Image (cartoon, grey):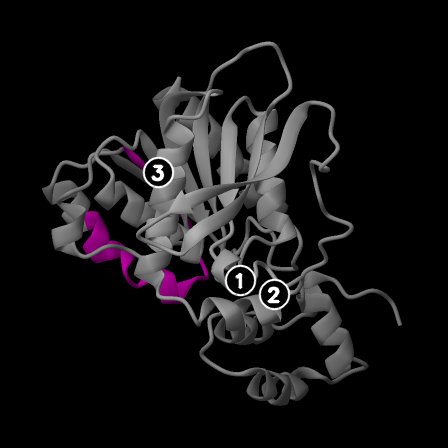
C-alpha cells in the first residue's frame, strides 16, 4: 500500500482527532469513530499511524546542534507545582545577554516538538525556556496519549503559575537581558494570553490557536499581541469575535492572522495537520514580532 498523504484523508478525520486530542472523546470512542473512515484500502491502524505525531523524523534543530547551547534546568514555582523542569536554550556565541522567550507546550507536556520549538528560538537569537507542566507528575511520559491523561490531573491555573514562575526565572537569568515574550500552542496559546493578562512587564505574546481571556481579563493586558488562528479551527475561533471586541475597546495593541484552510495544530510539523506554507509564514511573523518588541 502506498504511503498516505494528507489529501487522502477526509477532513472529518482531522476533526475527530481534534476532539480526541482535546478530551472530548476517549480513545475507545476515537478508534470506533475512526473505523467509519477505514474504507477503500485504508485500515484503522494505518489511519492511527498516519495521524499520530512522528517526532523522530521531523526535528528541525537537534539537541546537539552546534549553533546553540541547550540543556534542562529546574526552577521554583511556589504558587504552582513546586520544582519545575524546563529546557533552556540559547545561541552559542560570545554575546552574554539575549532577549527571552517562554515556550509553552500543548495539553500533553513538554514533548519533542515543543523542545524543538525552544531550540528554534535559540537559533533565531533568543534565550528560551520551555517548561514541562507535567514535572510534578513525573514529567512528559514519552507519548502524547499518556501526556494528555497526566495533564488532565493538574489545574490549569496552577499550571499558569508555573509559566509565570518561568518568566520570573528567565527575567533574572545571567544570559537574559530582561526583555521577555511568550509563545504558546493550543493550551499554551491560552497560557500566552493569560500571561499577558497577569504580567504587566511582559513585552510580547504570541498565542497560536489559544483560548481567549474574558473581557474583564482582557482589560488588564499591556503587552502587544500577535494572534495566530487556523481557518478550520471552529472550536477555538468561536471565541475570537468577542476577544477582538474587548481588545479594541481596551486599546490593546494586537494583530491577528487567520490562516485559511488549515487545521488546529498547523504549526506542529510532526503531525499531518501540519501545513508547511502557513507554519513557515506564521513562524516568520512570530520571530519578526519578537525582534521588534524585545530587541
Q: Name the spot of residue 181 as percent of width and height, x first.
A: 38, 33
The numbered mark, 3 or 1, whose residue comes first in the sequence reads 1
Q: Quadrant of residue 140?
A: bottom right
**What residue does disc 2 label?**
144
The x, y position of residue 38, in whole percent, is 72, 84
- Does residue 287 appear anywhere in the picture? yes
Which residue is located at x 76 percent, y 79 percent? 45
Q: Is residue 107 magenta?
A: no
Residue 87, horizontal then vertical, whole percent:
57, 41
- Mark 3 or 2: in front is 2
The residue under label 1 is 108
Q: Along the polypeptide, which appears first: circle 3 or circle 2?
A: 2
Q: Residue furthest right?
A: 1
Q: Is residue 257 visible?
A: no
Structural distance between the alpha carbons of marks 3 and 2: 25 Å
User: Which quarter of the image is occupied by the C terminus?
Assistant: top left
- Where residue 96 is drawn, which disc sits there? none
- Mark 3: secondary structure: strand
* Closer-to-camera residue (246/179): 179
Contact check, label 2 and label 1, Cβ < 8 Å? yes
Would you say 260 lies left or right of 50 here?
Answer: left
CA gap, disc 3 to disc 1?
21 Å
> In this picture, is 264 found above or below 246?
below
Q: Is residue 14 above or below residue 99?
A: below
Please report whichever mark, 2 or 1, sits nearer to the chain's N-terminal start: 1
Image-based side of 182 in relation to 147, left or right: left
In terms of secondary structure, where does tag 2 sit? helix
Q: Which residues are magenta?
A: 224-244
Q: Which mark is residue 205?
A: 3
Q: CA distance from mark 2 to mark 1?
A: 6 Å
- Residue that appears at 63% across and 83% down: 34
The quarter in which the N terminus is drawn is bottom right
Amino acid at each position: 500500500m502506498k504511503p498516505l498523504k494528507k489529501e487522502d484523508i477526509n477532513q472529518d478525520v482531522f476533526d475527530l482527532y481534534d476532539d480526541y486530542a482535546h478530551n472530548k472523546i476517549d480513545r475507545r470512542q476515537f478508534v470506533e469513530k475512526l473505523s467509519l473512515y477505514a474504507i477503500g484500502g485504508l485500515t484503522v491502524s494505518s489511519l492511527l499511524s498516519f495521524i499520530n505525531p512522528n517526532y523522530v523524523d521531523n526535528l528541525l534543530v537537534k539537541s546537539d546542534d552546534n549553533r546553540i547551547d541547550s540543556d534542562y534546568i529546574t526552577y521554583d514555582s511556589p504558587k504552582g507545582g513546586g520544582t519545575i523542569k524546563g529546557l533552556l536554550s540559547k545561541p552559542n556565541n560570545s554575546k552574554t545577554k539575549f532577549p527571552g522567550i517562554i515556550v509553552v507546550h500543548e495539553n500533553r507536556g513538554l514533548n519533542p516538538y515543543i523542545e524543538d520549538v525552544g531550540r528554534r528560538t535559540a537559533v533565531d537569537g533568543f534565550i528560551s525556556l520551555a517548561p514541562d507542566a507535567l514535572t510534578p507528575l513525573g514529567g512528559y511520559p514519552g507519548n502524547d496519549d499518556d501526556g494528555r491523561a497526566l495533564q488532565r490531573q493538574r489545574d490549569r491555573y496552577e499550571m499558569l503559575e508555573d509559566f509565570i514562575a518561568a518568566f520570573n526565572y528567565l527575567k533574572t537569568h545571567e544570559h537574559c537581558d530582561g526583555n521577555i515574550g511568550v509563545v504558546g500552542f493550543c493550551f499554551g496559546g491560552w497560557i500566552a494570553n493569560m500571561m499577558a493578562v497577569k504580567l504587566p512587564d511582559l513585552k510580547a505574546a504570541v498565542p497560536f490557536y489559544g483560548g481567549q481571556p474574558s473581557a474583564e481579563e482582557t482589560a488588564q493586558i499591556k503587552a502587544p499581541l500577535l494572534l495566530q488562528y487556523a481557518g478550520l479551527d471552529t472550536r477555538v475561533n468561536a471565541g475570537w469575535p468577542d476577544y477582538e471586541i474587548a481588545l479594541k475597546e481596551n486599546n490593546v495593541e494586537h494583530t491577528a492572522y487567520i490562516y485559511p484552510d488549515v487545521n488546529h495544530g498547523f504549526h506542529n510539523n510532526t503531525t499531518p495537520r501540519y501545513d508547511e506554507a502557513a507554519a513557515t509564514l506564521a513562524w516568520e511573523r512570530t520571530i519578526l514580532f519578537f525582534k521588534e518588541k524585545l530587541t
